[in-house]
């Protein structure tokens, strides 16, 4: 039991908490303590797209990579020296970047248009950062629109 108390004290000190922080609390609350230990971090704009998403895990994983700008495109692989060919394999016109793969390529743009029409969303597909911002604003609720 003493070992656990000493270990807990170490975790509090690592989190930057003092004994005064505990004594200043009028009533002890696990929720309050959790928030103190966790700290405050800014909310990211894409959290509604990733968290509580009912899509397949593979889709959510790829969406998270795109939101972080870490999806392995040919352009990104060329910067690491893994490949020399950076041209999109679908259209063979532009370099394969995240923006090109999702919106600029004529084939992916046609798919976006069909998806929007299928979801009965009356708007034209925009450039990639604009599409992500639009999706972040409209990712509310649990229906098909979200």
Image (spheres, helix red, strand yellow):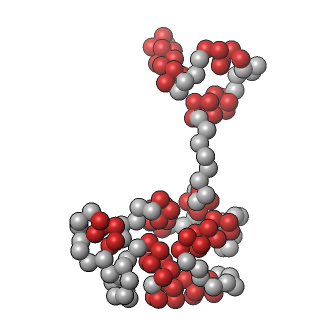
Instruction: Indicate whether 59 appears above or below 27.
Output: below
Closer to us: 98 or 35: 98
Residue 4 visible, this angle: no
Give the residue displayed 72% in from the left and 20% down from the top. 25
Asked where in the image residue 24 lies, by quadrant, the reply is: top right
State the count of labels.
0
- Which residue corresponds to the image point at 63% horizontal and 65% vertical from the top-left? 136
The percent coordinates of residue 40 (x first, y second) are 61, 38
Q: Is residue 4 left or right of residue 123?
A: left
Query: Image quadrant for the C terminus?
Result: bottom right
| Picture layout, residue 46 above or below residue 117 | above
Q: Is residue 27 left or right of residue 7?
A: right
In percent of the image, x 34 and y 71: which residue is there?
75
The structure residue drawn at horizontal position 23% and vertical position 65%, both measured from the top left corner, is: 81
In the current view of this chain or complex, which residue is farthest to the right?
A: 26
Q: Tell me, yes or no, if residue 83 can be seen here.
A: yes
């Amino acid at each position: 039991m003493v070992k656990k108390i000493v270990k807990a004290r170490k975790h509090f000190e690592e989190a930057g908490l003092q004994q005064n922080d505990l004594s200043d609390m009028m009533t002890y609350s696990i929720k309050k303590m959790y928030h103190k230990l966790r700290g405050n971090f800014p909310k990211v704009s894409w959290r509604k797209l990733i968290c509580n998403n009912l899509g397949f895990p593979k889709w959510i994983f790829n969406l998270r990579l795109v939101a972080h700008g870490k999806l392995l495109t040919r352009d990104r692989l060329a910067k690491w020296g893994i490949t020399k060919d950076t041209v999109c394999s679908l259209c063979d016109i532009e370099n394969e970047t995240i923006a090109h793969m999702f919106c600029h390529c004529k084939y992916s743009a046609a798919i976006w248009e069909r998806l929007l029409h299928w979801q009965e969303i009356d708007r034209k597909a925009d450039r990639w950062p604009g599409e992500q911002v639009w999706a972040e604003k409209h990712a509310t609720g649990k229906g098909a629109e979200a």
